């Protein structure tokens, strides 16, 4: 006569399947958290770069500032680099700010804006 219930083998198989499912779910949650963290950092870098670009344009400091950190904004782990490029139009230059982690090999966020600088002849 057979008893009602599960055998030891059936209980072990169920336990193994449940364990595999839990491990897979935890890996998924961790991957989701890593992705969210990366997106937040990317957004933070972009906002810092936009802020620095606006500051440089407002103060006219883009010719003298080439690189630095965001320590004054409470983010010493991030750095910026300023690049100024001339264009084919004499009075237009492109200013680019690249914000990244303090490591040189780190991928960062870049923002740029073209600015018009009137020639000295036009100013007179």
Image: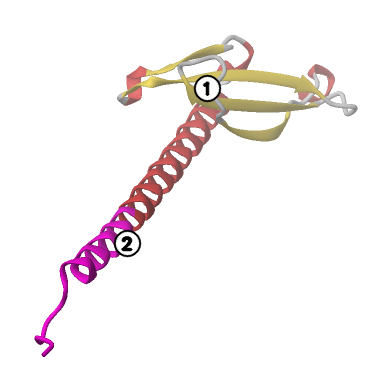
Q: Is residue 45 above or below residue 30?
A: above
Q: Is residue 63 above or below residue 123?
A: above
Per the image, the residue denoted by label 2 is: 21
Element type at mark 2: helix
Residue at the image position 52 percent from the left and 20 percent from the top: 80
Residue at the image position 51 percent from the left and 25 percent from the top: 100
Element type at mark 1: helix
Q: Is residue 96 above or below residue 22?
A: above
The extreme front residue here reads 1
Q: Which of the 4 image quadrants contains residue 81?
A: top right
Residue at the image position 59 percent from the left and 12 percent from the top: 66
The residue stretch that appears in magenta: 1-23
Q: Nearer the viewer, residue 5 or 101?
A: 5
Where does the image place residue 124, in percent across and percent down from the top left? Answer: 78, 21
The numbered dot on residue 124 is: none
Q: Is residue 12 left or right of residue 84?
A: left
Q: Main secondary structure of the magenta part?
A: helix
Where does the image place residue 65, in percent across and percent down from the top left? Answer: 56, 12
Where does the image place residue 109, in percent across and percent down from the top left? Answer: 56, 33
Q: Quadrant of the N terminus?
A: bottom left
User: How many residues crowd mark 2 within 10 Å: few (<14), some (14–19), many (20+)?
Assistant: few
Per the image, the residue denoted by label 1 is: 59
Q: Earlier in the sequence, mark 1 or mark 2?
A: 2
Q: Is residue 48 visible?
A: yes
Question: Per the image, is 14 magenta?
Answer: yes
């Amino acid at each position: 006569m057979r008893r009602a219930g599960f055998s030891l083998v059936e209980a072990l198989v169920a336990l193994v399947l449940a364990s595999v499912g839990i491990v897979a779910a935890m890996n998924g949650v961790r991957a989701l958290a890593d992705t969210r963290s990366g997106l937040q950092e990317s957004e933070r870098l972009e906002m810092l770069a936009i802020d620095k670009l606006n500051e440089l344009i407002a103060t006219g400091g883009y010719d003298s500032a080439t690189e630095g950190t965001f320590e004054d904004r409470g983010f010493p782990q991030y750095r910026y680099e300023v690049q100024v490029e001339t264009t084919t139009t004499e009075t237009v230059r492109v200013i680019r700010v690249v914000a990244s982690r303090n490591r040189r090999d780190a991928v960062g966020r870049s923002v740029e804006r073209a600015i018009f600088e009137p020639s000295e002849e036009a100013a007179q």
